[in-house]
Image (spheres, rainbow, N blue to C red):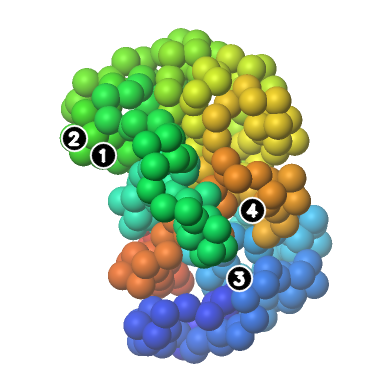
Amino acid sequence: MKRVYLTRPLPDAVVARAREFFEVEMRDETVPLKIGQMRAALTLFDGVLPTLGDGFSAEVFRDAESPRCKILANFGVGYNHIDAVAARSAGVMVTNTPGAVTDATADIAMTLILMSARRAGEGERLVRSGNWQGWNPTQMLGLHVSGKTVGIIGMGRIGQAVARRCLNGFGMKVAYYTRTPKELEFVATPIRSLEELAQRSDIIVLAVPGGPETRHLIKAPFFAAMQSHAHFINVSRGDVVAERDLVSALKRGEIAGAGLDVYEHEPKVPDALKVMENVTLLPHLGTAALEVREAMGFMAVENLRAALAGEEPPNLVN
């Protein structure tokens, strides 16, 4: 029986599914693997199920000639923590879990839109502090979302799911920027440049994949182009944003607020963001629902099963 390594505790149903096909070793820790642990995993296991933070870089594969491990079945759609080119050179397949994460991530984007625009985090903190003096007509006035323009950066599965929610649920107008032309089943306006999208939008939602091509895609000129009442939402990857520039834009009042589920140096969050009342901070909750995590796990296990049975895994990325 093939031997596989689960680098984090996973839902019971996922572990049970994996044990139907493999001899399974599951790590109890929830922190990312260290480089020595990753190198050992390539030697000791036929397949590895890693996730965010397990940095299988080119350095990890540097001395891995014909490793025992034949597949890294990533738990998650984003795989920028894995050097897929280096893995392929070492003879290791890389897969991910697209589709399973789409609706859950779009729901978190909507949560952040509403929390940021309507100052929900700030309001909850006020109530909990015991300092709320009661309702008044000018208390904590925020941005009314319905009918506004949302600018979506990245119109893949998640971007489209966000767009549908904004259109159908809130009557918003949708504009978008994407590197790959899209045929959409709903009304949306393509914008040719990021700065123009920033200028035209009341709310920006970032939904692009991570990786070298998108690192610091959003930086100072983009924030400077945004409207002063606008809100910035990130449900993609933290390093797509130059976090220092975001902090500066918030401090200068270039934008009204931000809602973040991901961070450039996750799990580290700048103290400057933590103390800002107009920033909503979530601990990477994008897919944090049991049925979603189970679906992701089942997809990763199927990728493992197929690859180790000599078949092409359904979600091969390299």
Q: Amino acid at mark 3?
A: Cys
Residue 219 appears in the figure: no
N-term mark: 4 or 1: 4
First in sequence: mark 3 or mark 4? Answer: 3
Q: Callout 1: helix, strand or loop?
A: helix
* Other residues around mark 1 within 10 Å, as few (<14) / some (14–19) / many (≥20): some
Q: Is residue 28 above or below residue 135?
A: below
Say whether residue 305 is left or right of residue 234.
left
Q: Find numbered disc 2 in the image and state the secondary structure of the residue it sits on.
A: helix
**Residue sitting at x 48%, y 53%:** 133
Q: Nearer the viewer, mark 2 or mark 3?
A: 2
Q: CA distance from mark 4 to mark 2?
A: 35 Å
Q: Which residue position holds label 2?
A: 168
Q: Which residue is mark 1?
A: 165
For numbered disc 4, what is the local secondary structure? Answer: loop
Inspect the image, locate mark 2, and give the three-letter code of the amino acid beneath it: Asn
Whether the residues at callouts 1 and 2 have beta carbons within 8 Å, the answer is: yes
Distance, label 2 to label 3, CA atoms, is 46 Å
Q: Closest to the observer: 183 or 67?
A: 183
